[in-house]
Amino acid sequence: MTSKNSLLCATACLALFPAIATAQSSAAAGAQPGEGGGQASVVEEIIVTANRRAERLQDVPISVTAIAGETLQERGVQNPEDLSRLAPSLVTQNNAANAQGTNFSIRGVGTSSFQRSVEPSVAVVIDDITLIRSELAVINFTDLAQVEVLNGPQGFLFGKNASAGLVNIRTRDPELGDSGGRLFSEYGQLNNSNNTSLFRAQGIANLAIREDAAARFNLFYVKNSALQDNVVPNPAFDGGLEQIGGSGKLLWQPSDALRVLLSADYMDSQGTGGGVATLRNATAASPLSIVLPAIGVTPGVDNDRSAYNGLTFYDLKVGGGQARIDYEFDSGFRLTNIAAYRGFKTEQAFDADYSPLDLVQFFGGGISTRQFSEELRLASPVGGRLDYQVGVFVLQARVRESNLLAASLGQTPPPGFTTVLGSDSFWRQNLGSYAVYGQGTYRFTDRLSLTAGARVTHETIDMRFENTAGGGVAPLLPIAPDRSQDRKESNFSWRTTLQYDLNDDWMIYGTAAEGYKGPGYAQYSFSYVKPETSTHFEIGSKSQLLDRKLTVNVSAYNTDFKDFQAQSIDFTTLSFLLQNAGKLRTRGAEVQVIARPTSRLTLNAGVAYTDARFRDFQGDTCYVGQVDCVGGATDSSGRRLPNAPKWKGVFDASYEQPLGRDFAAIFNVGVVAQSSYNFLSNGDPDALQGGVTTIDLGVTLNQTAQNWSLRAFCRNCTDERYVATVQGHPFFGADHIQNLSVGGFRQIGVALDLSF
């Protein structure tokens, strides 16, 4: 279906339902279903922690999208990849084998690389812990309090890197004096060749241990069938997804001054999920154009069938724990200490020729990532002329990966060799980050204030690397003996914001900032990648009108990046490159509107315009057949950034209708529309994702007296097809492969929610 037809369908659907929201309706109202009929017709306060304090969204001079946990569950958001449906400035890209290993782009900028040797440009924070790699953020969205998307550089208070923005995920804490539980289950089916089934269930219990202590436990289970139909009989193909895990928290609060919170979580995941690619296109000269159609696989943008005859699986384990202690002195100063550990480990194998051809015998390996962090922060009381926060941060981390490739290329290796093309590589990276930071707000008058912050960061990095031919006649990567390198980097980053309150319901602000992202090494070439820095300017306005029935937030920005870390593929050597792209610029504007015309109706709309382009990228690799390719390189200066749609909008609503006898019906509609974008920096026309408009519908029957609800839903009702990523085929460079996305198919299902 074309984007134009989808917009017409969206208009028709909105005419049938007098409501359009969930993306922030629950966040705004802070209410459970069934409560809306008795509330005042105002957009209620949204509380965020963008400045590491609990503050009203309208008081924070930062562009933030806040999404409540109830909304995430209502809209079927199960993992980080799904968040882009609810935030106009956020786009996700899955470069890992599991759909939850997601790289984010905010305002067009993100790290589109699956190499674990560099950090993401958009940081991910879970319960105040900044994660060094996207795979550490593999988490099932089962018991979340809120997700906040912070636009623009945010690397001052939240940890070691956030040159483009930050996704702040907060899970629910135990509640003192309350014992209860919740059971939730959901089943859906996709409109694809495999009729993929999706099932998840969770149980949550909050236990009041005594007056000053409580515990909270969360268990979940996910069982999905394969996202694509693998037409080749292959018992060694694990294309589904099965996950089991949980979390626990223990809260002890003996007084108003002292609060101790211990928490831990763990998940075991089996199966590739959305990580297995299908063939997007095959040229006439490619053998895949003959082999695949003969067995029922037709290459194309809508292709959801694969033909893998090799070992394909993806098993991961991820989890961690932390201890947080907060103590408030009689003077009002608050001291916070957070110590945390998080680890990730995977074993995997893929049929790397993406076909039934006997080109690759084996491609697989393992990844291990672990980090330990310690943070001590002192925050002053608020409400006076000056308030501030200062802190120290220490992080130690290790990332390790090993890979083995054996590719026969359809030939018999000569005596003394096990394969034709081989590689046996290992790399290990140790990281250290040490920082001191501070941020303060000074109020010149009751309406005029200045916020300024700075962070001094010192980082160490060392990498060990080796590669052999792995028994092959020729190596896939250049043979490298066991060797190591190390570097040190220091950085001073800052932010200053001037804010003026025109009245109690309208404020304007202007911000200047410099962000920072740490260095790395290209894991396949062992070359050093310099730190990435950003210089940012933004103006904005936040207002509430019509007796707070209407909220309008607007921002405009310009951000320049230097030494942007970019990945590309060299089809001459069949290797992935990681390099500094020179300069890029992103500029644009965002508008967010939240309205509550009646106590039963909440509307939300957000629009983001993004112009993100390379200003200087002269060494980008060419795609096969590129006209302006000279010596295997092209000048991508002036091209739009990958994964950066020019326009994106979300338009959502929720309406509640009482039915009597404690029953209520809740109608939800969500629309997401975005313009086209390219997945590759060189502008490859075969890697273009066309514009997409999706529509979600939901109807919930709620019984407040018995605390249960039954929901029927349709997600992507118009069956708009889109994918998670596109890249060139590793052996046939003119061909392209694509990773499928659950959201790229229509899903129909039901959900049952029971509280007790």
Image: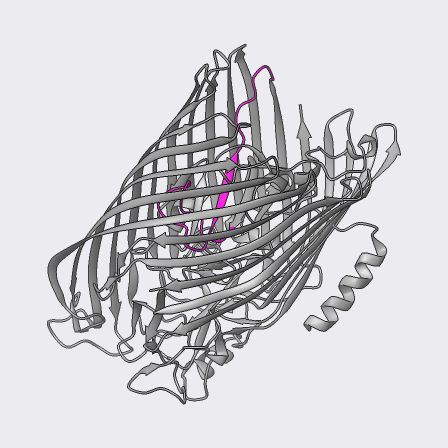
At 40% across and 54% down in the image, what residue appears? Answer: 514
Where is residue 426 drawn, in percent x and y?
20, 57
Quadrant of the rendering where the N terminus is positioned:
bottom right
Residue 292 in sight: yes
- Residue sitting nearer the eye, 489 or 493: 493
Is residue 745 or residue 333 the one in the foreground?
Answer: 333
Residue 150 location, x and y as percent? 52, 48
Position in image of residue 521 (x %, y %):
25, 59
Residue 506: x and y in percent read 68, 44
* Quadrant placement of the C terminus: top right
Q: In the visual, does 734 lie left or right of 609?
A: left
**Is 672 a magenta residue?**
no
Residue 430 visible at all: no
Q: Is residue 25 left or right of residue 116?
A: right
Q: Residue furthest right?
A: 660
Does residue 165 belong to the magenta stretch? yes
Left or right, 235 with respect to 33, comes to left
**Residue under the point 34% across and 54% down:** 348
Q: Which residues are drawn in magenta?
A: 151-178
> From the viewer's perspective, is residue 427 above or below residue 723?
above
